[in-house]
Image (cartoon, grey):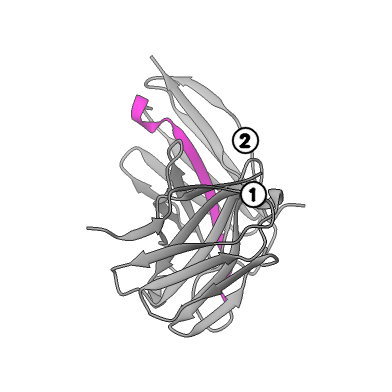
Amino acid sequence: RKEVEQDPGPFNVPEGATVAFNCTYSNSASQSFFWYRQDCRKEPKLLMSVYSSGNEDGRFTAQLNRASQYISLLIRDSKLSDSATYLCVVNEGLTGGGNKLTFGTGTQLKVEL
Amino acid sequence: NAGVTQTPKFRVLKTGQSMTLLCAQDMNHEYMYWYRQDPGMGLRLIHYSVGEGTTAKGEVPDGYNVSRLKKQNFLLGLESAAPSQTSVYFCASSYRTSLLTGELFFGEGSRLTVL
């Protein structure tokens, strides 16, 4: 079983649609959770952190359910510029400090006219 | 703002050749990482460093060596390249305190092909 699992997609949605991505993780001791965005042939960049209470950043809403080990990302009013691969990321920490980020394989989103 | 810079961006090697990827960051970050990204596999940690002069193995360290002689530089070496090392390599760096923020700053990637 992969440590972080995501549906690879692609999700093809029309502009203006609402789309949700899900992710599950296997290590119950994981400390923190994030969504990264990766454009085609580019480096990953942090999109947002994910908190148990849920958090919003504009059109993006992230949710965490620690009991179910489940993370979600909701994108409202999709824009063409949202087309990218969204990576679910879990931080388990490293002995001695630092981040041990485990990345999911990503979910590809294509927003169409 | 240079951020994290990787060189070279592209390289083609023959099996058995050696090469070094250089990563340089100008953000005074304590931690640096090397990842590889393969289709269907996600990003996997090769080696990491929590400070100048220290390195440690990640998830897939075999066939690679690293060095961090200066805080701003993290080198990834392939002593004897194999076709299985064909991949996109990403260097990243972070502050010591970014454990909870989770923010790694990535370089643009280095595409390596081993024939």
- Quick check: A14 above or below A109? above
Q: For the residues marked 2 and 1, what is the alpha-carbon distance in whole angstroms?
A: 32 Å
Give the secondary structure at mark 2: loop
- Chain letter, disc 1 residue: B
Numbered badge on residue A16: none
Residue A43 appears left or right of B89: left
Q: Is A84 displayed left or right of B85 in the figure?
A: left
The answer, for residue A82, to whether it is visible in the render is yes
Amino acid type shown at disc 2? Pro
Residue B102 appears in the rendering: no
* Residue tagged 1: B14
Residue A80 on the magenta segment: yes
Q: Position of residue A67 (x, y in %)?
A: 65, 59
Nearer to us: label 2 or label 1:
1
Query: What residue lies at 29% left-to-right and 69% top-to-bottom?
Result: B27
> Which segment is the magenta one?
A79-94
Note whether B1 is above or below A98 in the view shown: above
Q: Residues within 10 Å of mark 2 (few under 14, many from 20)?
A: some
B40 left or right of A15?
A: right
Chain of residue at mark 2: A
Q: Are marks 2 and 1 on the same chain?
A: no
Question: Looking at this rendering, what residue extends furthest in the left direction?
Answer: B1
- Viewer-closest of B76 and B16: B16
Q: B99 or B113: nearer the eye?
A: B113
Residue beneath the point at 44% across and 64% down: B22
**Left/right of residue B114 with respect to residue B32 in the rendered view:** right
The residue that label 2 is drawn on is A8
Q: Give the amino acid at mark 1.
A: Lys
Image spot of residue A59 (x, y percent): 34, 37
Could you tell me which residue is drawn at 42 percent across and 64 percent down?
B23
Quadrant where the image shows the C terminus of chain A: top left
